[in-house]
Amino acid sequence: MKNTPQRRDLRFAIIGAGMAGILAAIKLRESGHQQVTIYEKADRIGGTWRENTYPGLNCDVPAHAYTYSFAPNPNWSHYLAPGPEIQAYFEGVVRDYEIEPLIRFRQEITRCAFENGAWRLSTADGLADTADVVIAATGVLHHPSLPDIPGLDRFAGAAFHSARWDHGVPLDGRRVGVVGNGSTGVQIISALAGRAGKLLHFQRSPQWIMPVDNYAYSEAQIAAFRQDPALVDKERYNEAYLTNVRNFTDAIIDADSPQIAAIEEVVKTNLEQSVQDPVLREKLRPTYRAACKRLIFSPDYYQAIQHPDSQLVVEGIAGVEPEGVRTKDGVLHPLDVLVLATGFKADRFVRPMTVLGRGGADLDRVWAARPTAYLAISIPEFPNFFLLNGPTGPVGNFSLIDIAERQWNYIAQLLDQIESGHCREISVTAAAMEDYEQRRIAAAKKTIFASGCTSWYLDAEGVPASWPWSYNNFAEAMTRPNLEAFDRIGRT
Ligand code: NAP
């Protein structure tokens, strides 16, 4: 006679108290799990919203869509929420769901090894713990990428990365240089134009800019949202936004699509209509296709760069000197402050943590060619180890919260296999992983990201590391795991 499987009381370690780690903790508690610990290396929650505090920071996903589905927020001030409001929102959720007691702050997990059927974790401080399941919620764009510019360390003024903003440094009326024009650099320029005495934007490659109306919600609208949750839902599941973002995803996954041609028209028109000076306009015109680099949504960058105190510098940086930045044409641009909006090491994910799977399989080696995970969630030979917003995870410009919630729905069903005693260890099979990778890479090469530019989406071999199929395809994939794709050890 077959034994009835025993329900197991699992111990969980969540790594990271950002958006995804908080989500995992709330969901685990909701489903009755008591043994949940979140390890957080900093002294506050918030992940990217804790780390990024630069002037002008906001989220280019509409605020009501960048919100947990179970914790709507009637109070968002703008269509696109400012960073500090988002940080406050997560802090409020942590309070409301009483997550804080689960968090061990200032504890950086440095090693995580699967030994004798459990994960042994150790922290930089020498703390040790054991968990049945690890949820890696360590974020995507987390490790600042510092440019290799000669002389950077000799600069006499203040220099810092955009994710390490030094708020003690005055900006008003001063000479500020910003290197980099990704979403971050563009937002900083928009915020500092007219504040800095002289604002220099060092551009290595131009960017296409999608216009967006970042309107404020009126007091009356916010009051109505507070009174009627259905109105908040209406805003969140706004058909126009959902159609737009679905179209956008369809566009970027097919470089030959009519949708991408339509986007190209909009950004070209934006450039033509917004920039008066033909010389400046040509400096700002990219030679690659729209959305090849992550498309930038900005209501005001073109106005900011045309401010009388702003200057676009395209000559290329030769080096940094104590007085400022010297460009390749020999000109020295004197500066008081130098901001490095130079992006992140997007291939790091959980690293530099050492992660050792079954039989000592070293994640660093497994990811030597490129970081990847089956459906962005599971890795062969790393049982009971699940990633939220893991490699190949971003889906178009969709809200990473929506993506993480759907990934959680999938992970929860894998957890159920362990918890219900149907197996003790679960991880994707090598064959399913290989099949996923082949299909993913073939599809990724057809996306707009692979159409001839550099960006953080591209891995070391130039293959875009994002979800290369439609949003509907992603939503469908996350509804139910195909258990045949998983090694289930200890099955009853
Ligand atoms: P990024 O998109 O990777 O941009 C980095 C910028 O730095 C690029 O303009 C790059 O130029 C430049 N750069 C790098 N090294 C350089 C060097 N040595 N000399 C000169 N220029 C150099 O980084 P990011 O702007 O921080 O944005 C990263 C991602 O964060 C975004 O794509 C987005 O996903 C997310 N983000 C989102 C929001 C939001 O509103 N949701 C806001 C900020 C960031 P090249 O283009 O020539 O390489």
Image (cartoon, rainbow, N blue to C red):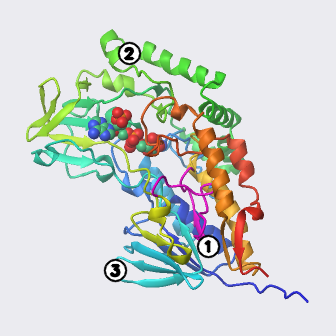
First of labels 3, 1 by sequence position: 3
Local secondary structure at mark 2: loop
Judge left or right: residue 210 versus residue 25.
left
Where does label 3 land, which residue? 125
Mark yes or no: residue 280 visible.
Answer: yes
Between tags 1 and 2, which lies in front? 1
Magenta span of residues: 368-392
Mark yes or no: residue 179 visible.
Answer: no
On whether ligand 1 comes within 8 Å of the CB at mark 3, the answer is: no
Where does label 1 land, which residue? 384
Residue 293, numbered circle = none
* Disc 3: CA contacts within 10 A as few (<14), some (14-19) or many (>=20): few
Local secondary structure at mark 3: loop
Please report the residue visible at 26 percent of the width from the left and 24 percent of the height from the top: 314
Amino acid type of the residue tagged 1 in the rendering = Asn
Q: Please state the horizontal and vertical placement of residue 221, each as a whole percent of the image.
A: 60, 40
Amino acid type of the residue tagged 2 in the rendering = Val
